Structures are given as structure tokens and as C-alpha cells.
Image: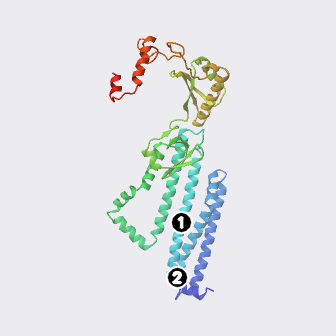
Amino acid sequence: MIPMALLDLVDLDGVPERGLGFLLLLTVLLLAVAALVVLIIELVVRLVAPSQPWAASLLRETRLALRLLLAGVAVQIAVSLAAPETRFSVALDRLLTIAVIGLFAWVLIEVVDHAFDGAMARYPTGADATRGTRRAHTQLTFLQRLATVTIIVVAVSAALLTFPQMQALGGSLLASAGLASIIAGLAAQSTLSNVFAGVQLAFSDAIRVDDIVIVEGEWGRIEEITLTYVVVRIWDDRRLVVPSTHFTTTPFENWTRTGSELLGSVELDLDWRVSPAAMRARLDTVLDGTPLWDRRVSVLQVSDATGGHVRVRILVSAADAGSLFDLRNYVREQLVEWVRHESPGAMPRTRVQVEQAASGGEGEPASVAGDGSASRQLFSGTPEAQQRATQMMAPSADPEAPSRAGL
């Protein structure tokens, strides 16, 4: 028996008890029908699973949501058909309707995720991924998120429209001439600007998942592209979160825009006695012994020869950015070892040439006379020079005397 306090709470005045019994009976009957439908669906999936493996995986991912949806539909139908007309039954019916809308949206999201996951499984990303693979993976990821957001927005809108007040508000907004201005104002906000930028990035092929980029002075790999921002995994495993508008309004470097192959240079400052031919032979030996080199480019040139040094520039190629970084370091180390052990004369050094200037006698300073004669020195070396020095250094009472003496 239902307690009297509960009957007073739900306002069941004038409702016969057989109405509640009929409601419970109908609810149980409809739940049994829902359970039977679930069993039939699972049986059909098991029959087609050998030829269609995706059906079994789809059922595993949507089993819980599907069971709850069918149970919610059964209870909602029972309440709408057999519940007495009270405030409680109306509120319960609205609550069940909202629950059914939410569960249906859940099932749709699971189906969409399964479909997109299966499609993206055909385009794996990684170091060996091609340009088309990365582009397809990026676009599928974006469409998956867009579909999920769309389902959620539609479900929330449908749930709100179950309230009469929201129906009136929605009708007035749709009939209002100011709706276009409201949408334009919202589009000008930064959030929607990032959303539009995300759409542009997903379909303009400017960046793709797994691309190597230089953003804000950081070298990293595109890890995720969302509706409003892009996650860049930096080389030291940090994550740089960049708004989508940054990639549509600011220049950036994309090292894998058309391919992952790259060129890199190594520069060494050596002495003039280095032999470029011998160094070039050593470079060929080093490159032939490492798998980091993709055998496309191998160049050694003397790019500069000033300041007492010879600058040797080495250009090599690799299949991707990581291999190029390791290859440049490897070539630099091997050539430094070669210079130390095989060609020590090529090690950079600074030369200083010291010359002793001519002088008038031992221990005497060099002459500064314009004609180079030791007998025409200014303040030392001859009696006349000594006399001039005495006159210049002697104190004078006349303050203008020093200036006149210098004339």
C-alpha cells in the first residue's frame, strides 16, 4: 500500500486505486517488450557478426545506452497512457520525455563515434603516415567532434522545447527580426571565431594531425585539432595549446606540408690547411655507414674563407625531422673526431705576428719623426730635443705661456 503522505504529496485526489495498478501492470508489460526487443537485436547481431564484425563491436559500445533507452521509452509510454491527470504525472511525463531525449542522443553519439573510429582506423598516423593519411585523419576527427556537438545541441534544444514557456520563447525568437543581428553578434565573439578557424584548418589542409610545426618559437608535432584550439606536442613532451585563430592569422612553419623529407646543414670553422677533398671523402664514408641518411643530398663546400678561418658547410638530407636532427649531430661528431685524429693541422688556430720596430739605440724608444731619422726626434735622442722638453715642462708665471710654447 502507498503511504497516505505520498498520496497527498503527488495530489492523487479522486483517483481510484485500480488506476495505479493498471499503470504498474502496463509498465511491467512494456518493460518486458523492451527486454524482448533487446534480445532480438542481440540475436540478429550474433547471426550477422561472422560476416559483419562491425555489428558486434557496435552492439558492445551501445548495449547499455540502448537498454536504458528502450526501458525509458517503455516507462514513458506507460505513464503517458495510464497515469492519472495530476501535477505529479505531468511532471513525471515531462521528466521521462527529457530522459528519453538524452538517452537517444547518447545512442546516436555512440553510433557516430563507432563509425568515425572505424573510418580513422583506415588512416593510422605516425612517422610513416602519408600526407593524404594525415589530412583524412584530421578531417575525420573534426567531423566527429562537430557531429557530437550538433547532437548535444539538438538534444538540449528538444529538451527545452518540452516546456511551454520555452516554446513560446522559441516562437518569438524565430519570428523576431532581430534574430539575424543576434547571430551576427555571437559570431563576432572569440569563441565562435575559433570555431570557424577550426573548420578552416580542418578543410584547408594548412595543418594536419602529426605535422611538424614551429609555433611561438617551439618545435613540435600537431597532436590534436579541436573545434577551438590546437594541441602541439613539443619535443620535450610539453603540450602547447594554441587557439585555432593563431594558425589562420599568424605565419608559422610547417615542415611536413608536402612531405616529411628535410635538408639540414652542419658548419665547421677550420684552419686554412684543411683539405676539402679529404674531408669530403670522410663525409661520404660517414653517411654510407648510417641509416639516418636517406641518400638524397650530400654536399660539402667551403662557404667562407675570412678572418683567418675556413668555413666548411655540409648539407645532408633525412626522411623526417627527428632523423635529420640526429644525422646532423652524428656528422658533426664524426668530422670533429676526424679533424682531431686524421688532420690535426686543420684545427682552428689564431696567428699573431710580432715585429720589432727600429730604434735609435739600445734601450731607446723608436723614432717618431716623419722622415725616419733618429737625429730628428721630438723630445729625446738629441740635445735640441732635450732642451725642448725642458722648456715645455718648466713652470711659467704666464698662464698663456704653455699655449705659446706649443706654437
Please report contact status of discs 1 and 2: CB closer than 8 Å, yes or no. no
Q: Taking 397 as reference, is 68 above or below it?
A: below
Q: Taking 73 as reference, is 375 above or below it?
A: above
From the viewer's perspective, tell me whether residue 339 is left or right of residue 366.
right
Rendering coords of residue 329 (x, y %): 61, 32
Identify which residue, 219 or 207, lies in the foreground: 219
SS type, badge 2? loop
From the viewer's perspective, tell me whether residue 172 is left or right of residue 282.
left
Identify which residue, 45 or 227, lies in the foreground: 227
What amino acid is found at the position of numbered circle 2 in the picture? Pro
Rendering coords of residue 294 (x, y %): 60, 29
The label shown at residue 84 is 2
Rendering coords of residue 137 (x, y %): 54, 45
Quadrant location of the C terminus?
A: top left
What amino acid is found at the position of numbered circle 1 in the picture? Gly
Crowd band around label 1 with a 10 angstrom C-alpha radius: few (<14), some (14–19), many (20+) = many
Which of the 4 image quadrants contains residue 248?
top left
Identify which residue, 88 or 191, lies in the foreground: 191
Q: Residues under labels 1 and 2: Cα distance?
A: 25 Å
Q: Taking 312 as reference, is 209 above or below it?
A: below
Residue 327 shows in the view: yes
The label shown at residue 9 is none
SS type, badge 1? helix
Colour option used: rainbow
Task: Answer with mark 1 or mark 2, whichever residue precedes in sequence.
Answer: 2
Residue at screen point 52% across, 80% down: 88
**Residue indicated by mark 1:** 102
